[in-house]
């Protein structure tokens, strides 16, 4: 009997504990963090990027620079392949999840490699790895320095700009490893393209 | 150069975790042993009707754990089924019965397996009042059980092992909540978002449309990692730039996952009155962690690609995070493990198959390692023909039975679940037709990974697997539940029988459990027990794939 009574009493305690924790940790705690995060509005609202006062994206969320059919627009630097929705869908982050020995992965890599080679007019073995592989999030905002430089001639030609100037712009946008040893060097595609449009005004 | 960066990052982790070891471990010991209650805690005990001074025997402690978890599962199930009525549902409908069953168990068991895609399934209501709450309290339950087991060693001739409600409360009020507030704000500073903006469509510079997601992410991200939970706010978890914006935040997240599990051996050493015991346990965890991180990184650098990886993290940033997450029972990912090279993906499974003890989850890692330590002193006792003891407590038939049941539980669930998925014809047809994304050996690996992750309460996945089916939601739900609570039953029973004993004096015949000899023995037992159990099934999956 004492056993049953003990179990009942503890269950009633459990119900009350779950409810109080729900209010404290599920309502008050997030509210406190949300209020405190107002002190860092740029970060907490999503590192939004504005051009002429209008929000055109987030510096952290990658975008595609393609037409409605998904064809690359030659006057813009291109992002990596994306498996998020139809590509860079911010409401459906996803990787391809193709296994390392998957025939589908080999086919996708062959497709992406051929497309990049055709667009840039280079041979397939010059193409860096990030250009033919889908990122983990499908929203990778970065490309490698090598992939950015590979696109310089095509972008300069499409815009009638001096290739040297575009190359210098890319180099000015290369971010090194954080603190010199964390992560990989990279170029933020949206920020590069905004700077490019600014230069081409 | 790449190797140098790997070593530097590993050294960074080791230095920070080493610096945290003493202060955090000592603080945890203080938090769980002081007789002083904070004012907010006294108010809480009055609200829930608990006398903090009264201790419980092991079965009352266990009933507290089970009652609290059962109520948590029921509430979380109800919240998902009634999602459309909650504020900030973002227009998402109620989740299905089997998905709600799976998710409720998943978050209450500290697994955080996600059969669903959060971006497309849950609004902020369920994420906050359901999932965030369980992120805290499931970790606090793990801490409580670990502390109860330590008391089994430190108490003498005691009928009690502490008060579950007090341990649970202090885990939240003194450890997880203050640390989460601090780290959530640091995460915001690195670029993690914290808002209620929903999805915003903007016109891009090419004239197209882009969607920017919003959400109270930082508040969940902090406890997701500190509590070794791992359930992402977004589908791609810590690969999402809003959960993990840059290499600095990624290193911070790695450290958050390791901080408490690696500090707990210090807490153990302090509470049993011998710091050397804590160092021995931490040394075993540290050696396994470094070896595992090195193996996975080597495998991926040899034959991995950038498929399923973020440019900002690269290969090293992905494997270090992947190792940390799978060996701490967190299950967060910053890259897609399904696309890892076969041996690196296999290492992720091996990390979980070690039993999540190196350093394992918050609380669960320490109690798991102490159970293996009991097996280790037993084996040593057999070799020299003496009754084994650990920390002055005799390891008799009852203790060995409980420890053996503990280490048999998760392998049974993993192997049985995987086997049933292919042995029942109707299930097999569904698994192969609907769920498996990459056919062949890798597809077998996806199923093996899923049951390994669920039974060990990790929560990461070979995410190509479509797990949102009645079979996987049910079978993985059962595996998570038994994989969490059966071991807790055995650990608390063990704590009760150890606490009841007096301490036997140390003699010249006592096996010292703080020397390198014991560290080596314990390492051997951890590796050999899991290797013998899982080698055949690994040979069918990642090893065969790697040899293709």
Image (cartoon, coloured by chain):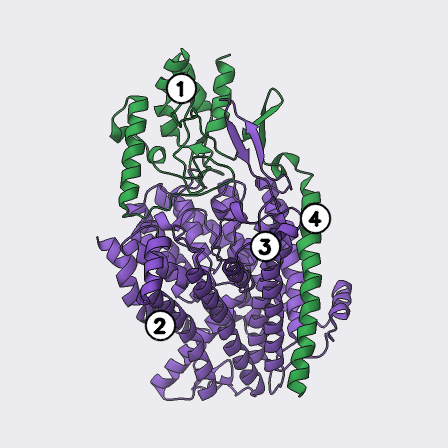
Chain colours: A green, B purple
Q: Nearer the viewer, residue A29 or B68?
A: B68
Mark 1 — on which chain does it sit?
Answer: A
Badge 3 marks a residue whose secondary structure is helix
Q: How far apart are marks 3 and 1 (CA)?
A: 43 Å
Q: Distance between the residues labelled 1 and 2?
A: 57 Å
Same-chain check, marks 3 and 2: yes
- Left or right: B506 with respect to B305? right
Label 4: which residue?
A31
Q: Which of A198 and A90 is in front in this view?
A: A90
Name, please, the residue furthest toward the left.
B548
Helix, strand or loop under label 2: helix
The answer for how far apart the CA atoms under marks 4 and 1 are is 46 Å
Which residue was labeled with disc 1? A167
Chain bearing tag 4 is A
Say if mark 4 contacts mark 1, CB within 8 Å.
Answer: no
Residue B170 falls in image quadrant: bottom right
According to the image, label 2 marks what residue? B529
User: Mark 4 and mark 1, same subunit?
Assistant: yes
Q: How much space separates mark 3 and mark 2, taking CA atoms?
A: 32 Å
Tell me the crowding category of disc 1: few under 14, some 14 to 19, or many 20 or more residues within 10 angstroms, Cα based: some
Residue B175 % position (x, y): 64, 60
Residue bearing mark 3: B223
- Mark 4 residue element: helix
């Amino acid at each position: 009997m004492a056993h049953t009574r003990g179990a009942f009493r503890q269950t009633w305690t459990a119900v009350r504990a779950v409810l109080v924790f729900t209010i404290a940790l599920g309502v008050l705690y997030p509210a406190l963090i949300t209020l405190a995060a107002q002190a860092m509005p740029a970060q907490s609202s999503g590192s939004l990027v504005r051009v002429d006062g209008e929000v055109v994206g987030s510096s952290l969320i990658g975008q595609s620079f393609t037409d409605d059919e998904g064809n690359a627009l030659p006057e813009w630097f291109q992002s990596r392949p994306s498996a998020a929705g139809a590509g860079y869908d911010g409401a459906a982050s996803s990787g391809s999840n193709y296994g390392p020995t998957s025939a589908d992965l080999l086919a996708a890599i062959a497709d992406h490699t051929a497309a990049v080679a055709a667009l840039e007019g280079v041979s397939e073995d010059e193409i860096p790895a990030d250009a033919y592989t889908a990122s983990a999030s499908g929203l990778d905002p970065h490309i490698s320095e090598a992939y950015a430089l590979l696109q310089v001639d095509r972008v300069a030609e499409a815009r009638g700009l001096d290739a040297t100037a575009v190359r210098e712009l890319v180099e000015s946008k290369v971010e090194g490893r954080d603190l010199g040893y964390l992560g990989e060097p990279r170029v933020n595609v949206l920020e590069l393209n905004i700077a490019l449009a600014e230069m081409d005004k | 150069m790449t190797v140098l960066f790997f070593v530097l990052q590993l050294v960074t982790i080791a230095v920070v975790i080493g610096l945290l070891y003493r202060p955090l471990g000592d603080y945890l010991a203080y938090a769980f042993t002081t007789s002083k209650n904070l004012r907010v805690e006294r108010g809480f005990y009055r609200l829930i009707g608990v006398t903090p001074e009264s201790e419980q025997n092991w079965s009352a402690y266990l009933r507290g754990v089970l009652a609290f978890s059962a109520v948590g599962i029921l509430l979380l199930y109800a919240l998902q089924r009634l999602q459309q009525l909650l504020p900030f549902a973002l227009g998402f409908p109620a989740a299905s019965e089997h998905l709600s069953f799976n998710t409720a168990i998943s978050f209450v068991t500290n697994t955080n397996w996600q059969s669903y895609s959060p971006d497309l399934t849950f609004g902020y209501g369920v994420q906050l009042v359901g999932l965030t709450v369980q992120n805290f309290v499931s970790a606090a339950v793990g801490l409580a059980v670990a502390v109860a087991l330590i008391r089994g060693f430190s108490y003498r001739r005691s009928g009690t092992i502490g008060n579950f409600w007090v341990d649970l409360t202090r885990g939240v009020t003194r450890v997880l909540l203050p640390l989460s507030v601090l780290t959530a704000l640091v995460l915001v500073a690195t670029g993690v978002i914290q808002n209620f903006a929903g999805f915003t469509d903007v016109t891009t510079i090419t004239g197209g449309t882009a969607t920017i997601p919003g959400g109270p992410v930082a508040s969940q991200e902090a406890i997701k990692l500190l509590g070794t939970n791992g359930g992402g706010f977004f589908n791609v978890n810590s690969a999402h730039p809003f959960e993990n914006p840059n290499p600095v935040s990624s290193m911070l997240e790695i450290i958050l996952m390791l901080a408490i599990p690696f500090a707990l051996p210090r807490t153990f050493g302090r509470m049993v009155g011998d710091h050397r015991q804590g160092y021995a346990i931490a040394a075993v965890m540290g050696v396994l962690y470094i070896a595992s991180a090195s193996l996975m990184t080597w495998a991926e650098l040899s034959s991995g690609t950038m498929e399923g990886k973020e440019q900002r993290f690269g290969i090293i940033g992905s494997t270090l995070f992947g190792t940390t997450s799978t060996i701490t029972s967190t299950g967060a990912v910053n890259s897609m493990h399904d696309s890892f090279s076969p041996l690196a993906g296999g290492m992720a499974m091996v990390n979980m198959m070690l039993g999540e003890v190196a350093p394992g989850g918050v609380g669960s890692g320490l109690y798991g390692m102490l159970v293996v330590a009991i097996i280790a002193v037993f084996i040593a006792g057999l070799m020299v023909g003496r009754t084994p003891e650990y920390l002055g407590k005799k390891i008799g038939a009852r203790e060995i039975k409980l420890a053996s049941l503990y280490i048999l539980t998760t392998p049974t669930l993993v192997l049985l679940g995987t086997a049933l998925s292919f042995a029942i014809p109707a299930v097999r047809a569904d698994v192969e037709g609907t769920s498996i994304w990459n056919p062949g050996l890798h597809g077998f690996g996806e199923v093996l990974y899923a049951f390994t992750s669920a039974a060990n309460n990790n929560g990461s996945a070979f995410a190509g697997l479509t797990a949102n089916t009645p079979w996987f939601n049910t079978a993985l739900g059962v595996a998570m539940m038994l994989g969490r609570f059966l071991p807790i039953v055995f650990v608390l029973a063990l704590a009760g029988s150890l606490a009841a004993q007096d301490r036997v004096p140390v003699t010249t015949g006592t096996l010292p459990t703080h020397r390198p000899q014991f560290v080596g023995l314990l390492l051997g037992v951890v590796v050999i027990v899991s290797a013998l159990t899982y080698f055949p099934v690994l040979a069918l999956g990642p090893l065969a794939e790697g040899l293709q």
